Image (tube, helix red, strand yellow):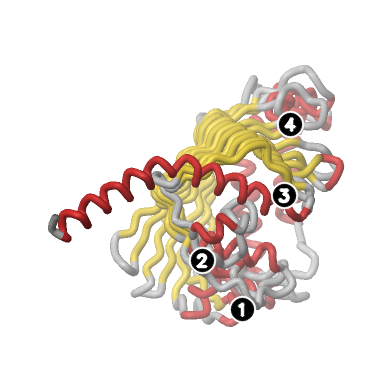
Amino acid sequence: MKKSVVAGIAAIALIAGGAAAVPAVESYAAARIKSEIERDGTTTVGGIEVGLFDRSISFTDLKSSQAAGMSVGRWQASGLGWPLAELMRGRTPLAGFRWGDPLQAGRLELSDLRIGSPDAGGAWKIDSLALEGVDLARFDAGDIGPYGSLVLVARALGALSVRRLEQRGAVFVMPGSGDAFSVATIVIERYAGGRMATVAVGGIEATAPQGRAPLFRIADVAISGLDVRRSLAAFSSADWRPNAPIGQVRVERGSATGFGGDTLARYGVSLGSVTVETVRESDSVSRSRTRVDGFVLAPPLRSMESLKLRLALQAMGLRELKLSFDCAGAEDRARAEITLDRCALSGPGLAEINLTGRIVGADEAFWHAVDDGDPAALYDSKAALASARLVVADASLLERSLKALAATTGQPAAATKASLARDIRRFQPAGMLITQNLTLLLDAVARFVEQGGTLTFDARPEPPLAIDRIDYLTSPGADLVSALGLTATLSR
């Protein structure tokens, strides 16, 4: 018989015998892993299953007494990129994982995860957590500074990529107070080193101890283009300290709807939605807009605070107060400018307050302060306020407010109006230089009280007021009107 034929028959026999031996090898590996995990006496495992062909491993009823204590009803990983030699020594991605180690897995699943206890510094519970396409690259776990735990987590998140994450039934109980913060669902798509393509969160609630109804609730949060890479970079530094810059969080679009809870209900507050949107027109130009819609204040008769609010509204002839907020602006790094195009607070049939403005000379120090979330760095910037405008357009709010004030003081409305206007003209703010320009500005405000209409404040400092001169505005005897180039005009 030819040697090649003999070799082929031998190979087939070896493969057949190996396949038959796989269950025994898997059982042996599971027993060995269980033994190694429980060797230190702080961790126990109810059962372990190992799958060689699909590179899977699963644990049931895992408990650890280390740190705050942890228990997992079931943990399973498939498509696991973890050395077999490490598994045999009891080192798994769940038990024995060392910071800085790489990890790849097609899918990771946990159910009934519990960490800590409310009486021992807080507790965390998750009903289920599933991750698909997990790829944790090797990262530096040395030189972590005094806040090592935070630094290591930030570095791990910076090295992590996950195709999809889905979490259900998460509850965190705050230490000491016992207040609970819960999230029904979290779904994250395409996480890569701190950037998330989409984030969907449902059923956010904050509940007091022994409380039945949530104090605060948000039904749905939807975010696209969430980028926390600058924050992770800040927290990853061994030099990070509390109150240090934490980096800017960027969002392409975000919305929150379904606000509720006992705290809002106590004051009769309802809120429709909050939306944030940023559009990048180029590498240097971006436009942002924030909107708050459907805010209504209708105080119920259930507490002294809400009763006072209700009486104040009734004195103004209102059953409820409706407001909306819309703010839009742009940054142009090529022109070194930031503009506030429109920032309006509106009450239908009452009034609208609108603020606009422009900052020029935005230099490297200014953008550093913006990008790194470091307000203190603004004092190193030469950026300056070029202009600002505040417009107060009255519809009926002024008359309603004077009516309520008259009811409080017991004076006729005409006398109340005249008295208020007189006090405004005589007003002399402490620590501020009293000039003819200030007198003219106060007179315009007094005439607004007397006549209504639209009051416009303009600030046009000449030259533009640099940020490093802001301290002058708070110094005793400062001439604010001249420094800011303030004027006030009244129109009907």
Quadrant (top left, top right, bottom left, bottom right) of the N terminus: bottom left
x%, y% of residue 227? 46, 57
x%, y% of residue 492? 48, 42
Q: Residues within 10 Å of mark 4 (few under 14, many from 20)?
A: many
Out of 174 and 259, give the one closest to the viewer. 174
Q: Is residue 89 visible?
A: yes
Say whether disc 1 or disc 4 marks the residue closer to the N-terminus: 4
What residue would you read off at disc 3? 38
Distance of mark 1 from mark 4, alpha carbons? 41 Å
What residue would you read off at disc 4? 207
Say whether disc 4 or disc 2 marks the residue closer to the N-terminus: 4
| Residue at the top extreme of this rendering | 301
Q: Are marks 4 and 2 in contact (CB under 8 Å)?
A: no
Out of 156 and 414, give the one closest to the viewer. 156
Distance of mark 4 from mark 2, alpha carbons? 32 Å
Judge whether 314 appears above or below 142 on screen.
above
84 on left or right of 262: left
334 on left or right of 314: left
Q: Which mark is residue 230?
A: 2
Say whether disc 2 or disc 1 marks the residue closer to the N-terminus: 2
Q: Residue at x 75, y 42 (%)?
A: 123
Q: Residue at x 84, y 25 (%)?
A: 304
Q: Which mark is residue 379?
A: 1
Distance of mark 3 from mark 1, alpha carbons? 57 Å
